[in-house]
Structures are given as C-alpha cells and as structure tokens.
Image (cartoon, grey):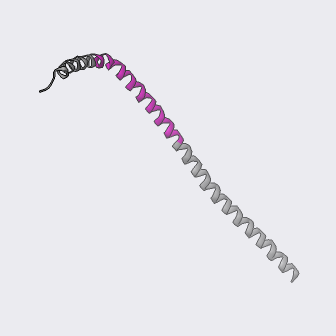
Amino acid sequence: MNELNVGILNIASLAVSLVVLIVGLVLWFFVNRASSRANEQVALLEALLDQQKRQNALLRRLCEANEPEVEKKTMAVAEDDEEDDFVRLVAER
C-alpha cells in the first residue's frame, strides 16, 4: 500500500509539472504575439513619421516658393489700407 501512495505522488507531481508547462507555453505564446504586434505598430508609426516629415518638407518648399507672391499681395493690401486711412481723416457730418 505504501508503494501505491508513492506511485500516486509521482503521477500527481508529473501532472502538475505538465499543467505548469502547458500554462507557461500558452502565456509565452500570447506574450510573444503581443510583442510582435507591438513591433509591427512601432514600424508603422515610424513609417508614418517619415511620411509626415516628407510632407512638412514639401509644404515648406511650397510656402517658400509662394512667398514672393504673398509679399506682392500684402503690398497691394497695404496700399489699399493707406487709401482707407485718408478717408478716415475726413470729418464726418
């Protein structure tokens, strides 16, 4: 009878070891999966950042290319403002 208890303890410890091993493998699978997804997201965010930097560079070049036209328009608007200033000097009745 004593040999039967020792055999049951050996089987029980083997079963517990198998359960712990299976739980560990399942946890490893999900952690590994989450890690690889996070790496994919980081790669996508880096690609998005690179595209945004390119867009900002293009916008700066476009703004610099259109800048002289803006100065001409502001000069024309300034001349119109000077004409309005003269009208403001006339006393109203």
Q: Is residue 37 left or right of residue 64?
A: right
Outermost left residue:
93
Q: Nearer the viewer, residue 57 or 84?
A: 84
Q: Residue at x 68, y 59 (%)?
A: 24
Q: Residue at x 66, y 58 (%)?
A: 25
Q: Is residue 4 left or right of residue 91?
A: right
Find residue 59 and report its horizontal and vertical position in percent. Answer: 38, 26
Q: Is residue 70 above or below residue 11?
A: above
Quadrant of the snapshot with the C terminus: top left
Outermost bottom residue:
1
Q: Would residue 67 be counted in the magenta stretch?
A: yes
Q: Would residue 63 be counted in the magenta stretch?
A: yes
Quadrant of the snapshot with the N terminus: bottom right
Q: Residue 92 occupies which quadrant of the picture? A: top left
Q: Is residue 31 left or right of residue 74?
A: right
Find residue 12 and report its horizontal and vertical position in percent. Answer: 76, 73
Q: Residue at x 57, y 47 (%)?
A: 36
Find residue 16 and report its horizontal and vertical position in percent. Answer: 74, 68
Q: Is residue 16 above or below residue 72?
A: below
Q: Nearer the viewer, residue 87 or 36?
A: 87
Q: Nearer the viewer, residue 55 or 89?
A: 89
The majority secondary structure of the magenta stretch comes to helix
Task: Specify the segment rendered in magenta.
Answer: 42-71
Q: Residue 57 occupies which quadrant of the picture? A: top left
Q: Residue 30 occupies which quadrant of the picture? A: bottom right
